[in-house]
Image (cartoon, grey):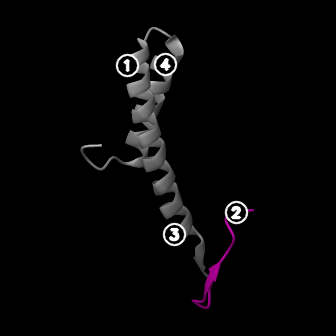
Amino acid sequence: MEQELSFEESLEKLEDIVNKLENGNVPLDDAIDEFKKAMDLVKICNKKLEVAEESIAKIVQDNGELIEFNTNE
């Protein structure tokens, strides 16, 4: 991607690509290109979600102690 997209922008572009591909009116070569773009957008969204999860995983208790909880449950 040329610029750093926000999670919301990435998700919106991903949804547009999915809608376009679901319509089925896309030539095969274009569909492959769109799929590749979609996979890049998925990677961007996943990375942003991982960063958000890491931020949320640290909770400050009343006494100021950081607690980490498992986000894989």
* Circle 2: residue type: Asn
* Circle 3: residue type: Ser
Which residues lie in the magenta part? 61-73
Classify mark 3: residues with Cα within 10 Å, few (<14), some (14-19) or many (20+).
few
Q: Nearer the viewer, mark 1 or mark 4?
A: 1
Q: Which mark, by number, is residue 55?
A: 3
Residue at figure coordinates x 48%, y 63% from the top left: 51
What residue is disc 1 on?
30
Classify mark 1: residues with Cα within 10 Å, few (<14), some (14-19) or many (20+).
few
Q: How far across and how far down the image is residue 3, in percent?
A: 25, 47
Q: CA distance from mark 3 to mark 4?
A: 34 Å
Q: Earlier in the sequence, mark 2 or mark 4?
A: 4
Residue at figure coordinates x 44%, y 34% from the top left: 38
Q: Nearer the viewer, mark 2 or mark 3?
A: 2
Near-viewer residue (56 or 54): 54
Q: Earlier in the sequence, mark 2 or mark 3?
A: 3
Residue 16 can be seen in this image: no
What residue is disc 4 on?
21
Q: Residue furthest right?
A: 73
Q: Nearer the viewer, mark 3 or mark 4?
A: 4
Q: Is residue 47 above or below residue 70?
A: above
What residue is disc 2 on?
72
Quadrant in the picture for the N terminus? top left
Q: CA distance from mark 2 to mark 1?
A: 36 Å
Q: What predominant SS class does the magenta segment belong to?
A: loop
Q: How far across and how far down the image is residue 2, in percent?
A: 24, 43
